[in-house]
Structures are given as C-alpha cells and as structure tokens.
C-alpha cells in the first residue's frame, strides 16, 4: 500500500501548527507499519519459495 505523499503534504500544509507534530508522528507510524509489513511479506515469500 503506497503512501500518497502529495496528499500528506497538502494535509500538513492546511493543518494548524499545533497538530503538525501529531501528523508527523502518524506519518512515521504509517511508514513503520509499512516497513514491518514488507519485512513480514519478504520472510513469508522466502519461506514459500524455499519449499520449491
């Protein structure tokens, strides 16, 4: 699931400053979750392909 950075930048620009920190934390969390999902899929793919 790719992250739409253009949309995220637009949302950040329109957001009040006090909420920007929360927004940044949300983006970092999304990136972390994405990285963990990719790592899990990579391990699963290697395990499946090892059976062949």
Image: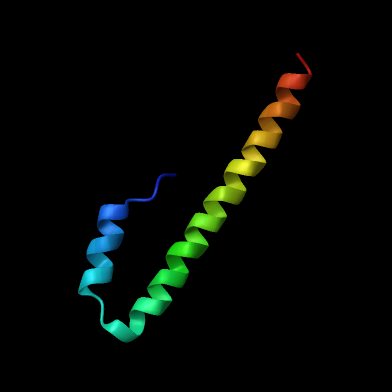
Q: Position of residue 28 (x, y in %)?
A: 48, 63
Residue at (53% x, 50% y) in the render: 34
Q: Residue at x 72, y 25 (%)?
A: 48
Q: Is residue 43 left or right of residue 8?
A: right
Q: Is residue 48 above or below residue 26?
A: above
Q: On the rendered image, what quadrant is the N terminus found in?
A: top left
Question: Looking at the picture, does residue 38 appear above or below residue 46?
Answer: below
In-front residue for pair 21/33: 21
Residue pushed farthest bottom?
18
Using residue 37 as the reference point, say whether residue 9 is left or right of it.
left
Q: Nearer the viewer, residue 21 or 11?
A: 21
Q: Quadrant of residue 18?
A: bottom left
x, y (%) of residue 42?
64, 35
Give the mark count: 0
What is the x, y in percent for residue 32? 55, 57
Determine whether, in the image, residue 26 is placed left or right of residue 20. right
Q: Quadrant of the C terminus?
A: top right
Which residue is depicted at the point 56% across and 55% down? 33
From the viewer's perspective, tell me whether residue 43 is left or right of residue 11.
right
Residue 42, above or below 16: above
The residue sitting at 25% across, 54% down in the picture is: 6
């Amino acid at each position: 699931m790719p992250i739409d950075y253009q949309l995220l930048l637009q949302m950040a620009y329109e957001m009040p400053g006090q909420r920007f920190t929360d927004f940044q934390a949300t983006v970092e969390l999304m990136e972390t979750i994405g990285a963990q999902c990719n790592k899990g899929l990579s391990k699963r793919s290697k395990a499946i392909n090892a059976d062949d």
